[in-house]
Image (cartoon, rainbow, N blue to C red):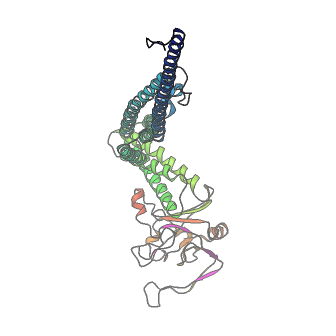
Amino acid sequence: MDVTGRFPSVGGRFFGSLQARIVAAVVGACLVLGLVGAGLWVRNTSSEEATSYHHARQQLQAQLAAARQQGYTDQDLRPVLSKYDALGSPNAAWWVPGQLFYLQSQTRQAQQLQDQLRALEQQVLAQSRSDAANQLGSARKQVAQAHQIGASDGEVQALQQRMTTAAADQGAARTVRDYRAAAKESRGILADATTLYTQTQQENQAIQQAAQQMVTQTGGNLGAIQAAGIAAVTNGRNDASVAGYLNRLNPLKGFSAIQSSNSRLEKYGALVGSGDVNQAARGAAGAQRYAGQIRQFLLSGMPAKTVMISFAAQHLWALQNGQLAMETPVTTGIRGDTAYGTDFGAMRIVHKEHPWTMHSPFPKGSPYWYPDTPVQYATFFTSTGESIHDANWEPDSELGPGSQYDASTRSHGCVHVPLNDAVWMYNYAQPGSTVVVVYPGDGSPMASQMTQVTTNAQGIPDSSL
């Protein structure tokens, strides 16, 4: 330093340069620190945005999973799923240029998809609810139309019961799955009601044609037409009653079809008594059609070996696989008028005896007592002593209608047949499998004949009846 207090020039240049370097170093360090800080800020901010994006994606995934659980299909969710599949991964490196803005954009997109999904769910739910209501309405209308043209009451009632269930299911529905299940249920009812309507319409047309032919063939004779109709109604009711008796013993194949035909039989039977020739003919033609159906279903559904005994007709028919194998007039006992009689119901052959001596179950001195009576062939259908057997004390000519009311011929519960038929029955019947149906056969409606059953569901006489 000179006397002026200044450094020498060389020294001044040196220290000036050093100062500049220090300043430059400080500035550089600040720049580095700034860049590092900025990088850390960008990194932290990107990490936060990645977390937000990841969270938004998770929420969207959970919302989609919940939607599927409620019954929304991928087809329903396609507008959202297609955009969801296009979303990028939240795990890209934070230092990728523009990543921060990318993550922010993806987060917004995921959040918008959540809103879109909620709106889509409400739209699909409303459509499903509306479809369920429309399907039920269509089904109800079709059932009403089938009923209007005279469809079977049983089938209409079954459809109405299903509609009641469908309406309850629809009322309890909350999710898309619930409403779609209700709609499917109603579509099934609609399809069945449409089939019933079509079949009924076709049958009505066939009956109308048959009625016109009947009028032509009888020359419009009202009495002849009514007689044909009454015979058909009587036969149909009796066959339906046999089916009802058999169904108590074991579920009868085709019994529901018999019930439907019987319902239609009663509808047309009500027209037979009309004083209008065309109306009576329509009733008679319908009765013949449905009586024929009942007989066909009965024969195809009954056990391989079945014996039918009509109390009113005092007649026995033995069938083998639905084909008549033997028939004969008979004499039975009468229930109600005496302390004994032949039971009504479906029963089974329990055992066979040859020969057999019948002992009176009544004490000597009783008006019902009888001495020991031998018979040659006895085929028992109850454990209480009722059997199909020969009766040498009753001439064959006295068998048949009315013999059950004659005190000299009626039985105490057994069924009298000619000796040759007793032998045939003995050889034909198989204990445990052959079924014997004793029924009123009076041509009354099936419901009435069913009330006269005196055996339980196992075919055993019920002492309380």
Of residues 70 and 449, the one nearer the viewer is 70
The structure residue drawn at horizontal position 56% and vertical position 74%, both measured from the top left corner, is: 387
The structure residue drawn at horizontal position 51% and vertical position 85%, both measured from the top left corner, is: 360
Write down the region rendered in magenta: 336-362
The reply to whether residue 402 is visible in this rendering is yes
Q: In which quarter of the image is residue 150?
A: top left
Judged from this view, the residue extending furthest toward the left is 275
Principal SS element in the magenta part?
Answer: loop
Q: Is residue 172 above or below residue 242?
A: above
The verdict on residue 203 being magenta is no
Q: Is residue 329 above or below residue 137?
A: below
Of residues 98 and 444, the one nearer the viewer is 98
Q: Number of marks in the image? A: 0
User: Quick one: quadrant of the C terminus?
Assistant: bottom left
Q: Is residue 17 above or below residue 178?
A: above
The verdict on residue 337 being magenta is yes
Where residue 54 appears, x then y in whole percent?
49, 34
Where residue 319 appears, x then y in whole percent?
60, 59
